[in-house]
Image (spheres, coloured by chain):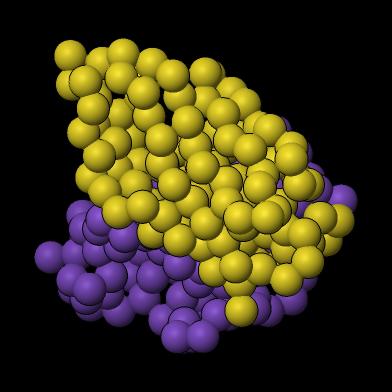
Amino acid sequence: SAVISQKPSRDICQRGTSLTIQCQVDSQVTMMFWYRQQPGQSLTLIATANQGSEATYESGFVIDKFPISRPNLTFSTLTVSNMSPEDSSIYLCSVQTTRTDTQYFGPGTRLTVL
Amino acid sequence: GNSVTQMEGPVTLSEEAFLTINCTYTATGYPSLFWYVQYPGEGLQLLLKATKADDKGSNKGFEATYRKETTSFHLEKGSVQVSDSAVYFCALSSMKTSYDKVIFGPGTSLSVIP
């Protein structure tokens, strides 16, 4: 399985500011995803990060709030914009390769918004 | 649409007790089924998977059998340890060779006490 790293691992931010989370994979992967896990909850898919094109967002998530970049097959960023306390969550990056049905996850970024 | 249901937690067990976490699913066709584990403060790790009916996935003493007739994928372990304390997520994916959204259950929190 791929080795996935995320930076930062945690952060405490003030409301109204933005935070960019990085996801790096040690091998080229086909699909990269961003999830949100609110406290005590399951995972919710935010978007699929598409290499060289705009991300595909799930219902309830918009590009203005969660801009995503994927400049190549091993790297993606998620920005949480104009943050409010409701954005306090764990944000997880995951990857999947062609011809497999398994997603592998990064360690997550724990965000607290004051 | 596809869905996953898990038994509600939290589950508290004594060390060396037998563990069962129930998982049932609704899906068309023959999805792949997964158990992920999230240890405190960490991301999700793939624990085991099964891709067709009657397959048994196993890892670290955990087992789960893909039961098509009961649409279930219950997680079992014969003797739990304190280090097994974590949140366990049952999940499914409908596509075996290309991308489809992974559907996660709500998670079951397990605490093992000495």
Which residue is rendered at x = 29% and y = 43% of the image? B109
Q: Is residue A100 visible?
A: yes
Chain represented in yellow: B
Q: Please tell me which residue lies in front, A40 or A46.
A: A40
Which quadrant of the figure contains the C terminus of chain B?
top left
Name the residue nearer the viewer: A5 or A94.
Answer: A94
Q: Would you place residue A33 above or below residue B107 in this image?
A: below
Give the residue at x 62% y 57%.
Answer: B71
User: With B28 as the anchor, is A104 left or right in this view?
Assistant: left
Q: Residue at x 53, y 19 (%)?
A: B60
Q: Which chain is purple?
A: A
Name the residue furthest front: B69
Left or right of B102 in this view: A6? left
Of B113 and A46, which appears nearest the observer? B113
Question: Residue A86, position in %: x, y?
Answer: 22, 73
User: Residue B66, position in %: x, y?
Assistant: 67, 44
In the shown orientation, is residue B44 left or right of residue A28? left
